[in-house]
Amino acid sequence: MKIIENNKDYYDQSIDEIKLLRYVKTNCDDCDKKNIIRMIDYFYHKEHLFIVTELLKDNLYDFYKFNRDQEESLYFTLNRLQKVTKQILEALDYMHSLNLIHCDLKPENILMKSYSNCQVKVIDLGSSCFIHDHLSSYVQSRSYRAPEVILGCKYDFKVDIWSLGCIVAELYTGYVLFQNESVVGLLARILGIVGPIPEHMAQEGKLVSSYFTNEGILFQEGGGVDMHSQNVSESTKKRHRKKMEKEGATFDLLLPKITNLKSRLKDVDDDQFINFVTKMLEIDPEKRMSAKEALAHPWITESKYPEDN
């Protein structure tokens, strides 16, 4: 059971989730095949809201952390990771066919249904929205937030695919792909691993000026850290320092540490897998795969791995 305390913000979000779970169930002959959590009932008790769902097991974050810390063999081999990824894509493809964006896909929102059969289900539709709704500029947990959302561009179903790309990389390596302590830090990691930002997104994004100078350099206000070690021209530093000091602010200029996705995936020797993750983590959503396209990718349809015991 999911228990929602008598708090207006939580309550309103949970009512929306109930409506969406009912909508998903109404449009599906067999929800088990769509890999989305099945709601059984809901009720009120002492002014709190209770949502009753099918019984599932650990979320992927807790499970992979326990597996890596406590067990000798890793659960998420490429074979199992392929199975899990396909199931999540099937859930997303179905949601997207209903014009729904999940908007908060992360390891905590995917639960194990069966360890032995490697089955999962997507949960928590509380942040989900229809594509034609007035879309919020604050969606997705930060480490899984798509670049178009961060920059204040228009976004659609493809934000879920970005999140899934982050999840797949994390399950394989055991580490958050874009580790960060702030939105600017997140952008620096993204640019360093899969960047740069396409020009049309830099022009469109309503929040670009909050993170980039006119020269396209990332900056962060309030740091006050000495920038002499940064590989930025002195004229650029001086110009922006004057501007920021005039406004009574301190700032850091940030240069992303350049690496690549293959090295972040521990130099895995599997071109299909690397290509699959790369296409999910295209910064430009116009070039990023859809859920349907991802389901047809050779890593899903052709790659064969030994079955795990």
Image: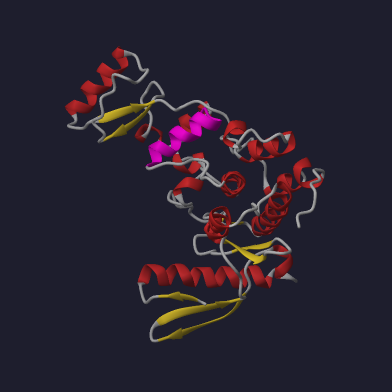
Left or right, residue 132 beside residue 202: right
Give yes or no for residue 85 being in the magenta stretch: no
Give yes or no for residue 189 being in the magenta stretch: yes
Observer-nearest residue: 233 or 93?
233
Observer-nearest residue: 37 or 85?
85
Q: Residue at x 48, y 79 (%)?
A: 50
On screen, residue 49 above or below 251: below
Q: Residue at x 54, y 64 (%)?
A: 124
Outermost residue, bottom direction? 46
Left or right, residue 58 beside residue 85: left
Secondary structure predominantly adopted by residues drawn in magenta:
helix
Q: Residue at x 40, y 41 (%)?
A: 183
> Picture coordinates of residue 204 (x, y %)?
47, 34
The quarter holding residue 210 reads top left
On screen, residue 39 above or below 209: below
The span picked out in magenta is 182-196
Outermost residue, front direction? 72
The answer to whether residue 206 of the structure is visible from this angle is no
> Picture coordinates of residue 82 (x, y %)?
72, 50
